[in-house]
Amino acid sequence: MDFELSDEEEAFRTAVRQFGDCVLRAREREIDTSGRIPEEVLDEMAHLGLLAMPVSAEHGGMGASAVLTELAAEEVGRGDFSMATAVFFLLEAGWGYILDRHGTEAAKKEVLPSVCAGKAFLGIATTEPTGGSDLAHMRTRSRRDGAEFVVHGEKAFVSGVEEAKRMGGGHLTLTRAANGFNFVYVPTRSERLSTQKFENMGRMGISTGGLTYDDVRVPERFLIGSEGKGFDCAMEGFTVARTFVSAACVGAAERALEIGTAYLKEREVFGARLGKFEGPQFELVDLYTQVEAVKWQCRRAAWLLDRYTLRGDASHRSEVDKAVASVKLAAPQIAFDCVKRVMMWHGAAGYTKDVGLELGLRGIMSYLVGAEGGLNIMRIILGRELLGRDFVPYH
Ligand SMILES: Cc1cc2nc3c(=O)[nH]c(=O)nc-3n(C[C@H](O)[C@H](O)[C@H](O)COP(=O)(O)OP(=O)(O)OC[C@H]3O[C@@H](n4cnc5c(N)ncnc54)[C@H](O)[C@@H]3O)c2cc1C
């Protein structure tokens, strides 16, 4: 077993860390207050190959492995503590990969180069106003009409709606069909498609919105996978994207501990530096131990993706599902805990925007409440794999 990165991987990680340290940290507050990731930041990400990393070179990406993408997600999560840039990064990586793997050649050529260049946005639309966890009972439908699909219904809490409207692009959209589920790419500027914007509490640099489809017509070249079989493609995308979500949370957790460690060394209370007291010192040690554990859990999940999922090999599906669900269950909780405890070490200062911990708190919270699947859904996946399908509480 070799934990060492290759020279190329190490060099790439150094370049992304530098970008995170110099560009993202300097602009994270601006990203949060302005509500958007500046164009020049996206340009630099494109220049580094950070947009839709796993997409093949033929379609504008760098054909990166899941491990390399996971490493980059960590650095982006550490750089922009608000998580907005990490969300942008991981949505394009996960769903860019799915379009590249299961889309038609015409769709790949039309959509992916501009996504990889930072000139268009690509996201995922599965959640509906009536619920996001129980996808099998979604209401948005699509039906074939000649060489088109007609989509009718409503999606909600979808990331990147404003970005796709402004920059161009759209969302891979899961819909019910006569014979199962169709997964289709729907450009946000389509006719008869209207959008709404939600006011979130965090990760303000990327919007969350609603999409209403009033018989939106989508050409058949935008079908992902085969007709009626879209559910599996969407689940594959979640498996990949959840790994990168977890990596971004690891990066954010490390950033919080970095802020906390510096403070423990510097702050004096009762005539001694705060880090000398066992209360906060042991908390730091425990948090570090948990973050290290989840970091390697995450690296292993990415390694499994490279070994099986990204090669179209479903032979280790259960192992992959367990690895990904357990890391997506653990990483956001540990990251949130790190931020909360470091805030406590700071006392009143931790509650101010000057220290900046609240950026992380607000951003990471999105992964606790549900983005890319709620914690209980990860538990249900794990319960199913550990006990068997008979123990899933619904069918
Ligand atoms: C910031 C943000 C960005 C998002 N971006 C996107 C996006 O880009 N695209 C998209 O499609 N969606 C997106 N979502 C929506 C996200 O996928 C959903 O929030 C998630 O799937 C949960 O759905 P829900 O919010 O409708 O909660 P519900 O499904 O109503 O669930 C409510 C609560 O009950 C729990 N729960 C549900 N079923 C069970 C069960 N059987 N047993 C025990 N507990 C259960 C859930 O874990 C959750 O805590 C985003 C959400 C957020 C917060």
Image: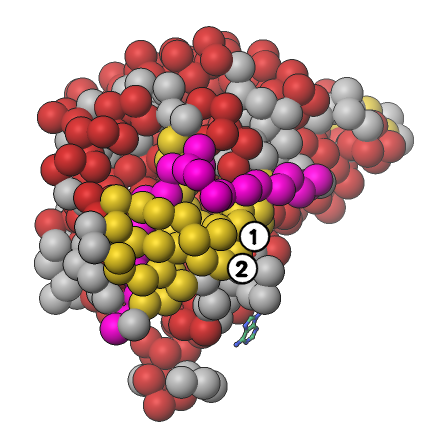
Which range of residues does the magenta coloring cover?
179-200
Q: Residues within 10 Å of mark 2 (few under 14, many from 20)?
A: many
Label 1, ligand 1: CB separation under 8 Å: yes
Image location (x, y in percent) of residue 30: 65, 16
N-terminal label among 2 and 1? 2
Label 2, ligand 1: CB separation under 8 Å: yes
Location of ligand 1 given as a quarter of the image: bottom right
Q: Dividing the image into 4 quarters, which one contains the C terminus?
A: bottom left
Q: Amino acid at mark 1?
A: Ala
Q: Residue at x 53, y 59 (%)?
A: 128
Look at the numbered discs 2 and 1 and tell me whether their residues touch, using CB distance below 8 Å: yes
Image location (x, y in percent) of residue 184: 31, 50
Local secondary structure at mark 2: loop
Which color scheme does this rendered protein use?
secondary structure
- Whether residue 237 is in magenta: the answer is no
Q: Residues within 10 Å of mark 1 (few under 14, many from 20)?
A: many
Q: What secondary structure do most residues of the magenta stretch adopt?
A: strand
Q: Amino acid at mark 2?
A: Glu
Image location (x, y in percent) of residue 46: 33, 17
Reading the image, the residue beneath label 1 is 156
Reading the image, the residue beneath label 2 is 128
